[in-house]
Image (spheres, coloured by chain):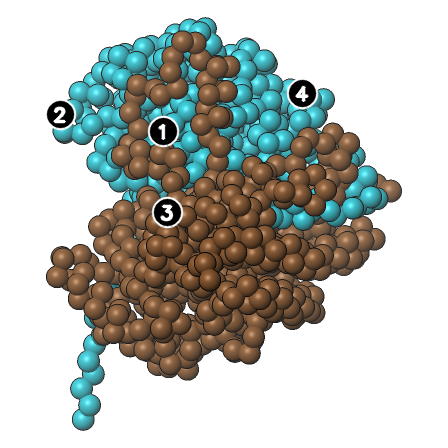
């Protein structure tokens, strides 16, 4: 009789087996429920409507129109000698024409209030990679970045997983509309110190995800003062800067730096991407704009792990250099997002649901705390489950965004057609009416 | 003629396959046309190096007042180790070759690039495919429908259709001796992140991989930089034609053990870079036995699998596993389209593994390095056109073979022989007799002469961690045939100055 000798399982790394990818959280569990039963107007009208994905689909037709108008010319003169150069181009500096186009697009979004130098643009395959890359560069394993709560759930994975860096939260609450305060900054810093963790920087998202609000100019000044005193970095993720409903309401950290004559700007780095403003997440286009030469050098080299396809750079470079197109797109996109937002907020109000007053982004920060049995995370998750399984809406619970106050939810409105939004709002209205009836 | 562009379909994967993939292609051509009218100087293709000092100073002046270019807030120690200028001849040579690039008309005394393993021999075939298929799309050729919704997440580790096409292509490349299962594929933006992801998954910081020397200089960065994983060289010698010996592997493993260093796997490239040799079936079996015995992983970088010439057949690690009932969980293959299909700019790489946990973790990690959607769309029909790919593979091999023959014959005229090789885009040239003294310093001096007198950039063995001085990697697939006599003549100049006085 042969004896089976069991082979010892060949080991994997701690990173491979860690849960830091965070995909067991409700944020992602909701996506699974959607994947299994996705709403479709005709084929599955009672399916789950995805309101947990911050994607922008409201302005595709503008992109399509542009491409259509210029696609005709492509069918003639298809001299392919340019193809060869492009196919071979893997320089981590990226196509200069594309970097120029990105810099000028970023300027346009800020209405020319500040200038961007194409030589400071580092290209990455998406903002996800840009944030991770900056974290690798600015912090060592065991160090920390301070991040205001509530924050984008993906940061837990993007900033921490492979880097070994910690996130120490800067707690914000509804008493002042979740704005960052100097006290909160100081408290977070002290908190890290008490855990013997070195703080290397502050990472803000402006406009904020999940709040859907731009950060006040005065708050930006305070944050910049804080990082300067502590001699740490500031990363400003401005991925939603083109999705501000009114352009005058957005202040980029770049503008603050300019107003200070770029004094001490080497600690500031901006992250941008085309995934939200242009609605092209699949294209994987992100950038790091750093005022620090060493960071630019290092980031460029490190971008070898996350280069943008030269084909995509070529494709988008021309489109983004077209001033007429970009001006028109940015204006229309803002208008449409504002209209969606107002529709959303109006519909929610009719249902008796309040939101934080927002002015940007692809989502609302909705207050469902009246529905909670107790002001606890468990109650919040119970409401989330009810909405997911009974109302068939996938929305993101505040706890997955590390919000310290239970009851808040992020609800996306730009990743669907207007009709679908109406269906979703009706469902919410019915749900709220039911609850009124049942609670007497 | 109006063309409705279903962009939403392109982005989300709904809509016609042909339209969805070839409209970006059409756009592409439009943009070429458009750009020709607004031409800026062509970008230098210097893939791994940079002129940063000049760059930094310029941008400092325009944006900063009074300050030096170094910020006060520190960067991490990880960053510090790389921000220093590249001092390896591999990178320096690439820089020089791009700064002073040879051009037949504009710069006939420029540096001829033989240090970049790129293949320019067969791009015309791809160009032809593009023009043939572009027409078909505009005339409204039919298309397959896209299953599933290719949203942000699904694009992550590769659209299913692309995985299917890629699996088929890999099988073709490897002579159909093995079939690849698309669900075991994880697609990444190039082979560089594929290697790094595997290192992150298979080893903890401080652990090590055994790696036969000489090896591709890029591994020092790709394997070690952000992962903290180390490389332990297992030296191979010319007496064995630089083929790995299991004895040497065993020795290296034991020495590591004694040092308290945990070895997690073996990393090898097959066909090997820079030597160009192909591992025999027996060696592959031996490697697998060794890995099983020590309970470690094998990462087989097979990126040059389709670029073979000469008589030997390429045998993939996958083929060994197919026919053996062994523990497959320890074997992982890396592939990509940069070499065999000449598309390094498009960033297309792949991890192929039998290990469920590695696949799961790798898929999650592709969020940092996904292939761009338009590129995925373009490649699906291209790789699925098996008539085209077959013709491409065969023609390309023939062309590599004939360049190899010409180049090696040319070197032999100068008394320079090459190691036996049958794969890759380069040859491993023995220039030991041209060196004085016979050590690394002598090798670097020779490299310098070749770069500055002969004006050719080749990669010295020391940059590849070769234990024997005097060997140089010469890539010949960036040349056209007519340049070979010129290259040989230039090398002759240096050879003549190096010969001992008779």
Q: Is residue B376 left or right of residue B189?
A: right
Q: Colour of chain B?
A: brown
Can you say which quadrant of the picture contains the N terminus of chain B?
A: top right
Dot 3 falls on which chain? B
Residue A131 vs residue A63, the one in the foreground: A131
Q: How many marks?
A: 4
- Residue under label 4: A327
Q: Residue at x 46, y 55 (%)?
A: B498
Marks 4 and 3 sit apart, C-alpha to C-alpha, by 42 Å
Mark 2 vs mark 1: give the one in front. 2
Q: Colour of chain A?
A: cyan
* Residue A194: image tag: 2
Q: Secondary structure at mark 1?
A: loop
Q: Secondary structure at mark 4?
A: helix
Q: Secondary structure at mark 3?
A: helix
Dot 2 falls on which chain? A
Dot 4 falls on which chain? A
- Residue under label 3: B221
Marks 2 and 3 sit apart, C-alpha to C-alpha, by 36 Å
Callout 4–callout 3 Cβ contact below 8 Å: no
* Image x and y of residue A164, in percent: 26, 40
Q: First in sequence: mark 1 or mark 4?
A: 1
Q: Residue at x 42, y 34 (%)?
A: A299
């Amino acid at each position: 009789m042969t004896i089976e000798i069991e082979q010892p399982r060949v080991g994997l790394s701690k990173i491979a087996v860690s849960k830091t990818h965070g995909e067991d959280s409700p944020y992602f569990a909701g996506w699974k429920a959607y994947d299994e039963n996705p709403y479709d107007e005709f084929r599955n009208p009672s399916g789950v409507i995805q309101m947990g994905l911050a994607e922008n689909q409201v302005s595709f037709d503008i992109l399509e129109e542009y491409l259509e108008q210029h696609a005709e010319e492509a069918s003639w003169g298809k001299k392919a000698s340019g193809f060869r150069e492009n196919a071979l181009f893997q320089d981590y500096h990226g196509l200069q024409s594309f970097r120029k186009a990105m810099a000028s697009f970023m300027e346009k979004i800020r209405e020319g209030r500040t200038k961007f130098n194409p030589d400071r643009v580092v290209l990455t395959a998406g903002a996800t990679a840009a944030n991770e890359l900056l974290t690798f560069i600015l912090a060592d394993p065991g160090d920390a970045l301070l991040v205001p709560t509530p924050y984008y759930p993906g940061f837990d994975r993007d900033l921490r997983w492979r880097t070994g860096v910690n996130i120490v939260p800067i707690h914000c609450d509804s008493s002042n509309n979740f704005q960052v305060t100097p006290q909160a900054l100081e408290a977070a810093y002290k908190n890290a110190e008490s855990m013997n963790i070195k703080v290397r920087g502050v990472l803000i998202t402006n406009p904020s995800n999940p709040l859907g609000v731009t950060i006040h100019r005065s708050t930006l000044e305070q944050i910049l003062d804080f990082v300067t005193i502590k001699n740490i970095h500031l990363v400003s993720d401005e991925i939603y800067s083109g999705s501000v409903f009114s352009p005058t309401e957005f202040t980029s950290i770049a503008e603050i730096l300019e107003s200070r004559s770029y004094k001490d700007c080497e600690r500031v780095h901006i992250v941008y991407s085309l995934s939200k403003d242009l609605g092209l997440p699949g294209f994987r286009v992100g950038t790091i704009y750093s005022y620090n030469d060493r960071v630019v050098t290092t980031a460029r080299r490190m971008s070898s792990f996350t280069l943008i396809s030269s084909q995509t750079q070529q494709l988008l470079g021309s489109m983004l250099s077209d001033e007429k197109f970009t001006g028109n797109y940015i204006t229309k996109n803002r208008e449409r997002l504002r209209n969606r937002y107002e529709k959303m907020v109006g519909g929610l109000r009719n249902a008796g649901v309040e939101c934080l007053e927002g002015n940007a982004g692809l989502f609302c920060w909705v207050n469902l705390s009246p529905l909670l049995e107790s002001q606890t995370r468990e109650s919040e998750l119970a409401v989330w489950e009810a909405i997911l399984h009974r109302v068939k809406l996938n929305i993101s619970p505040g706890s997955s965004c590390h919000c310290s106050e239970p009851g808040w939810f992020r609800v996306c409105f730009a990743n669907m057609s207007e009709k679908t939004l109406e269906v979703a709002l009706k469902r919410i209205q019915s749900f709220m009416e039911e609850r009124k009836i049942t609670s007497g | 003629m109006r063309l409705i562009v279903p962009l939403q379909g392109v982005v989300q994967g709904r809509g016609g396959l042909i339209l969805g993939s070839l409209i970006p292609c059409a756009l592409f051509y439009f943009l070429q046309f458009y750009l020709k009218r607004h031409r800026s100087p062509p970008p230098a293709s210097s893939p791994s190096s940079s002129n940063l000092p000049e760059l930094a100073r310029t941008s400092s002046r325009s944006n900063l007042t009074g300050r030096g270019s170094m910020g006060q807030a520190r960067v991490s120690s990880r960053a510090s180790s790389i921000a220093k200028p590249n001092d390896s001849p591999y990178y320096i040579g690439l820089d020089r070759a791009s700064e002073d690039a040879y051009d037949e008309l504009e710069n006939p005394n420029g540096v001829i690039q033989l240090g970049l393993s790129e293949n320019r021999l067969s791009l015309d075939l791809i160009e032809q495919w593009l023009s043939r298929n572009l027409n078909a799309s505009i005339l409204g050729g039919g298309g397959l429908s896209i299953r599933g919704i290719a949203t942000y997440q699904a694009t992550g580790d590769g659209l299913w259709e692309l995985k299917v096409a890629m699996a088929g292509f890999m099988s073709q490349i490897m002579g159909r001796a093995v079939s690849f299962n698309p669900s075991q594929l994880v697609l990444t933006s190039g082979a560089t992140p594929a290697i790094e992801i595997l290192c992150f998954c298979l080893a903890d910081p401080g652990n090590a991989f055994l790696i036969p020397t000489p090896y591709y200089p890029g591994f020092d960065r790709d394997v070690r930089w952000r992962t903290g994983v180390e490389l332990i060289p297992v030296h191979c010698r010319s007496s064995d034609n630089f083929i790995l010996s299991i004895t040497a592997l065993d020795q290296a493993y034991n020495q590591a053990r004694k040092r308290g260093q945990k070895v997690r796997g073996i990393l090898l490239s097959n066909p090997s870079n820079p030597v160009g040799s192909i591992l025999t079936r027996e060696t592959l079996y031996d490697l697998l036995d060794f890995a099983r015995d020590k309970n470690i992983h094998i990462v087989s970088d097979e990126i040059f699998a389709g670029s073979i010439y000469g008589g030997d057949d390429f045998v993939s690690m996958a083929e060994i596993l197919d026919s053996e009932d062994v523990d497959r969980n320890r074997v992982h293959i890396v592939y990509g389209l940069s070499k065999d299909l000449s598309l390094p700019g498009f960033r297309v790489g792949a991890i192929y593994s039998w290990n469920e946990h590695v696949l799961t973790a790798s898929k999650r990690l592709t969020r940092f390095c996904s292939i761009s959607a338009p590129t995925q769309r373009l490649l699906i029909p291209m790789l699925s056109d098996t008539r085209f790919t077959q013709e491409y593979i065969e023609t390309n091999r023939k062309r590599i073979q004939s360049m190899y023959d010409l180049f090696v014959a040319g070197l032999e005229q100068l008394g320079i022989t090459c190691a036996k090789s049958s794969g890759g885009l380069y040859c491993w040239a023995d220039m030991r007799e041209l060196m004085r003294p016979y050590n690394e310093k002598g090798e670097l001096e020779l490299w310098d002469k070749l770069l500055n007198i002969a004006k050719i950039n080749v990669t010295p063995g020391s940059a590849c961690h070769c234990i024997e001085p005097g060997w140089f990697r010469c890539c010949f697939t960036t040349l056209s045939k007519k340049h070979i006599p010129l290259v040989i003549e230039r090398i002759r100049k240096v050879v003549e100055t190096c010969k001992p006085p008779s």
